[in-house]
Amino acid sequence: MMLVFYGQGRVNQLGGVFINGRPLPNHIRYKIVEMAAAGVRPCVISRQLRVSHGCVSKILNRYQETGSIRPGVIGGSKPKVATPEVEARIEDMKKMNPGIFSWEIREKLIKVSLAVATTE
């Protein structure tokens, strides 16, 4: 038996090759969805394609939720979630107490948002 490694490829417990941290190739994702649509159980898909059961489940769940077999985005920047109002409050807190820690700002913002939510 000859093992072939492509770059950082490793062999999982089922004998399949994978690259840690990288998405499963699209042709295997497509095959997983195709087999599931044909009524094949996830544990059988896992053994036949030599992909972990967890990976098969994740791909099938994502397909059911989004209709896509594409992997999620790796890396990149997170979207900015602070509104101009929140940014203004943070600036005010920093002016009032220049040595304030970020976790203290976060706690105060959460308390304010909870207080606003309960009055509405």
Image (cartoon, rainbow, N blue to C red):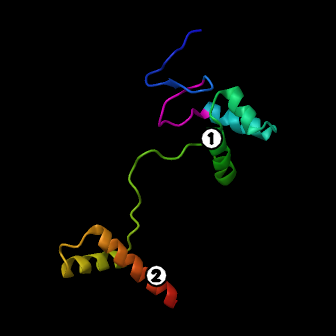
70 or 22, nearer to the observer:
22
Is residue 3 shown left or right of residue 44?
A: left
Of 101 and 9, nearer the camera is 101
| Local secondary structure at mark 1 | helix
Residue 114: numbered disc: 2
User: Which amino acid is tagged 1?
Assistant: Gly
Residue type at the position of mark 2: Leu
Say above or below: 42 vs 50: below
Q: Residue at x 56, y 34 (%)?
A: 24
Q: Residue at x 50, y 90 (%)?
A: 119
Magenta stretch: give its range: 16-26
Whichever of callouts 2 and 1 sits on the residue coming sooner in the sequence is 1
Residue 98, x across and y down, in percent: 17, 75
The x, y position of residue 97, in whole percent, is: 20, 78
Give me the disc on residue 54: 1
Give the alpha-carbon distance from disc 2 to disc 1, as whole Å: 37 Å
Q: Quadrant of residue 27?
A: top right
Q: Main secondary structure of the magenta part?
A: loop
Give the number of marks: 2
Indicate the secondary structure of the residue bearing disc 2: helix
Residue at 63 percent across and 26 percent down: it is 14
